[in-house]
Amino acid sequence: MLRRMSHWLWLLLLLICLLTVVSGCPSPCSCTSEIVDCRNKDLTSSTLPASFPSTTQVIRLDMNNLLSIPNGLLDHLPNLREVFLKHNPWHCDCDILYLRSWLQGQQKKGLYRDVTCASPEPLEGRVIMFLTEDELVTTCQYWYCNLAVISQLCLFIFIVVQGILLIFIILSLRRFQKIAREARRTAKELQQSSETYTYDNVPLCDYDRT
């Protein structure tokens, strides 16, 4: 009786373990206890699973449409032994730096000698883990150049707008000063006219009656 209960208990524990592994399997991949199979799923860098089970030992990402690997995706997998990466159109620019760094940190580098760049043209066919950082950084220059051009353009527009506002303020002040001068002159003329009118209407004394 105890032996039968022990047998069922082991089966239950095994079932729980299997359910745990299956439930942690990222879509649209299929999983076993050690392997996550995502090959030939038409995956791109944006549709790639965000994480893998911590017990994963092998990940198959071959035969997809991956251009790069998101930063940190292959980290925190202590049991990971191999990742199949062939037959993907890897684009070797700034975004490939993480994959290059990960490949260079692997002990079995021979497994990844066929993981090569598909683009851009100057790096086509190059083994990713053998790329130098300078080669990849130069492919990112356009991003910094575009940012610099946009920044300079914004600065130029800001200066132009400030100049237009300054000219408008100066013209407005001059117009205000002109209006103020005209108002003062008009007020002075009115005051003089008023004084003249008062003087002209002062009654004269009639000395003949005295």
Image: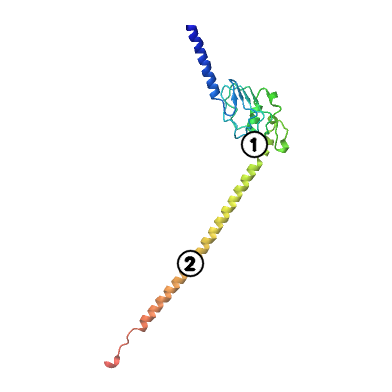
Q: Nearer the viewer, mark 2 or mark 1?
A: 1
Front residue of 191 and 64: 64
Pointer 2 or 1: first along the chain: 1
Quarter residue 188 falls in: bottom left
Q: Tag on residue 160? A: none
Disc 2 to disc 1, C-alpha distance: 60 Å
- Find disc 2 in the rendering and name its residue: 177
Name which residue lies at 29% across and 91% down.
Answer: 207
Front residue of 100 and 12: 12
Relative placement, left or right, of 90 versus 15 is right
What's the amino acid at mark 1?
A: Cys
Asked if the residue under mark 1 is in contact with the one under mark 2, i.e. CB atoms within 8 Å, the reply is no
Name which residue lies at 52% across and 64% down.
Answer: 171
Task: Tell me where residue 144 appears, x and y as whole percent.
Answer: 63, 42
Q: Secondary structure at mark 2?
A: helix
What's the amino acid at mark 2?
A: Gln
Front residue of 81 and 174: 81
Mark 1 neighbour class, 10 Å CA radius: few under 14, some 14 to 19, many 20 or more = some
Q: What scheme was used to colour the molecule?
A: rainbow
Name which residue lies at 66% across and 43% down.
Answer: 142
- Find disc 1 in the rendering and name its residue: 94
Task: Tell me where residue 110 appears, x and y as whole percent.
Answer: 70, 24
Q: Secondary structure at mark 1?
A: helix
